[in-house]
Image (tube, rainbow, N blue to C red):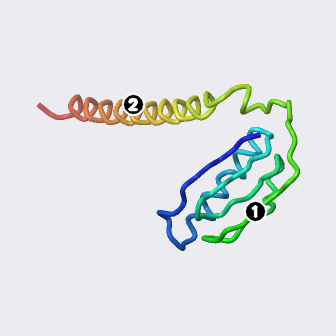
Amino acid sequence: MLANLTNDAWYGVSSAPYQHRDFYVFRAVESDRFVARVANSGVSAFVSPTGTVSEATALDGEAIAIARVYPRETRTLYVRLGDWLPAVAIGAVLGALLLVIARRLRVAVDKSSRAAQNRPR
């Protein structure tokens, strides 16, 4: 189980506390764990491993929420492998970008050298 204890007071009355709560839907699914989100003035809730939000409290209100959660022992692909996949993806994009730039530079240099060779002297 994951727990998120947060101070959402600085968001004020806005959509931000709801967006902040929704981040934990992704954390629950990617880790296959229940999440208990407790906010002092934001939205408190429980999130299931499938991403279902339950027992959500009102913004800037006092409440007690109770939900049935239980330990899970599964390990998702993300939990096993970590953040290397985004790093590899960024590296591949940067490598492809450098390759495109190098090819364009090579074409520009080839054109200018051919033009220099074809000039009458």
Classify 111 as above or below 26.
above
Q: Quadrant of residue 82?
A: top right
Residue at image position (77%, 40%) is 1
Labels 1, 2: front one:
1
Residue type at mark 2: give it.
Ala
Percent coordinates x, y for residue 117 in the rendering: 23, 28
Classify 59 as above or below 113.
below
Crowding at dot 2, Cα within 10 Å, few <14 / some 14-19 / many 20+, comes out as few
- Helix, strand or loop status at disc 1: loop
Q: Residue furthest bottom?
A: 13
- Helix, strand or loop status at disc 2: helix
Q: Earlier in the sequence, mark 1 or mark 2?
A: 1
Q: Is residue 115 left or right of residue 106?
A: left
Towards the viewer: 89 or 37: 37
Percent coordinates x, y for residue 87 in the rendering: 56, 31
Number of numbered discs overlaid on the protein picture: 2
Percent coordinates x, y for residue 96 in the rendering: 50, 33
Q: Quadrant of residue 45?
A: bottom right
Q: Quadrant of residue 16?
A: bottom right
Residue at the disc numbered 2: 102
Q: Residue furthest left?
A: 121
Residue at image position (72%, 41%) is 2
Q: Is residue 88 left or right of residue 26?
A: left
The quarter of the rendered structure image containing the C terminus is: top left
What label does residue 64 carry, if any? 1
Distance of mark 1 from mark 2, alpha carbons?
61 Å
Crowding at dot 1, Cα within 10 Å, few <14 / some 14-19 / many 20+, comes out as few
Percent coordinates x, y for residue 28 in the rendering: 75, 45
Classify 66 as above or below 86.
below
Residue at image position (47%, 34%) is 94
Residue at image position (67%, 68%) is 62
